[in-house]
Amino acid sequence: MNSSKLVEFIRTLDKGELRRFGDFLNSPFYNKDKRLLKIFNFLKKYHPLFESKALEKEQVFKKLFPKEQYSLSQQNKLLFNLSKLVEDFFTINQLERNPIQNQLLYLDALKEKRLDKHFFSAAEKLDKAQEKWKKEDCQSYFFRYSLHHLIYTHPSFEKSQSTVENFQIFNEHLDWFYMATKYKYLTSNKSLENQIKTAYEPLHISYFLGLTEKDLEKSPPLVKVMFALAQAYQKKPTESTFRQLKTILYQHIDALGKESKDAFQLLFNYALLAQFKEKHNTELLDLYKFALNKELIIEDGYMADVNFCNILILACKTNDIDWARQFVREYLQFIPPSSQQNVRIYAEAYLAYSTGEYEQAVQCVVQNDLELTQLNYKINARLIQVKSYYYLDDFDRLMRLFDSFNRLIRRNGLISKDQQHKYLNVINHLKKLYVDRHDKGKLKQIRAAVSQEENIASKAWLLEEIDKSLVGTYR
């Protein structure tokens, strides 16, 4: 049973939700079979791991219902019914977290019951409450469209509101919802094309991108921002266009509601693609600092560890070390608990490496190797160790590490062939660089090979070190 759909569902419930689900099952409105509550009360004793042998299905039913004759079909029916109740509980939970959707369903019920006075009174209050909410996002546009559509289609509508005015409102918000969403996904698809090298041509793209600023003059900020992004992504990214997009987004960011995070990510992706004359990393770091200030990369109290590491790396590359240390102290707490230890060790090692404390970086990796439980952090920590030995000019330790790193990559079944080649390539080329760093002829051959290689880790760093060796300033 520990791998069943039911257990998988219950495993995701926190302590508060477990208690509330028990109350949910105890309510005859939702559940009229007390056996389901009995099964749940037994299962929750093993939450969240569910690893006991006592959870084998037949044993559970014989223990809970000793007076009933065991029946596989009856057992499966009970488990299915309990799973359906968990699904209902999930749905009700989501409704409680979405009061707007709740209100629309309430209005729909009043409309169906022909409680006209209460319907129009509640609709008016809801409309006024929404007008006070200054942030505009796709959800708010769709909500106001849905609200005014309910009003417009009410049988008694003409007696209560101006038909033309209401028709204009719900059409306007429908247009804004559609246009903002369309531009957003046009941009997202274009951004994705650059990553997966696959083109997708949406319907009516020429019409939507052919509109002018005058056409959008009366549109809200979100539509204008998404339109600007969508247009920009259709051409080769440039620094000047990036600065225009940045100005538009920064100007309107506080009015974008939930869409502000997606808009920022699309701008950041554009910045990655744009060709900057200088200080590209500084621009990227400034974007991240803006995002931190506006809480654009913190979701439900957590920051994705990939964003954390990118910020740390950019800060170190731009020599903003004091800020980087402060960032780690302040934001490590926002990393999900499952990754926090791995991120802490990586950050400590990377900071030491970036400030030239190579021996300290090595010791950090070696002493905490067993605590690096996530493979990607173990591999990236080894890369820090490899680079540190290279700068320390420690031939013996570097060669031993090459061998152990090679075994880690080749023998781990969780690493894809593509990823294996990515890391084995950097090991092999760095080994050649270290051995032949005084031979300019061979260095040029190594550089040509690295330049042509698309699947290689730390490519920019490796090319930089080769160039240093070519002019005699390596290490």
Image (cartoon, grey):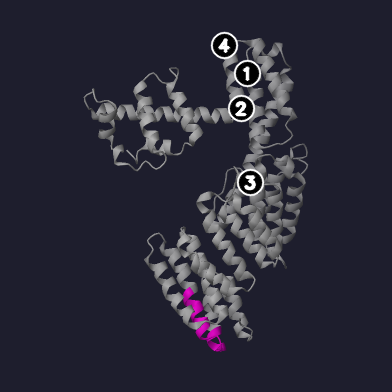
Magenta stretch, residue numbers: 427-443
Give the left or right position of residue 279, taking residue 464 as reference: right
Query: x, y percentage for residue 17?
Result: 49, 32
Q: Looking at the picture, which amino acid does disc 2 mark?
A: Pro
Residue 176, visible in the rendered structure? yes
Residue at the (70%, 36%) spot, across then down:
136
Secondary element type, mark 4: loop
Q: Which residue is mark 1?
A: 153
Q: Is residue 145 above or below residue 193?
A: above
Mark 3, mark 2: which one is toward the viewer? 2
Q: Which residue is mark 4?
A: 113
Q: Give me the C-alpha separation between circle 1 and circle 2.
A: 22 Å
Q: Residues within 10 Å of mark 2 (few under 14, many from 20)?
A: few
Q: Which residue is mark 3?
A: 262
Q: Give me the C-alpha separation between circle 1 and circle 4.
A: 14 Å
- State whether the magenta stretch is mostly helix, strand or loop: helix
Q: Which residue is mark 2?
A: 99
N-terminal-most mark, 1 or 4: 4
N-terminal-most mark, 3 or 4: 4
Residue 456, visible in the rendered structure? no
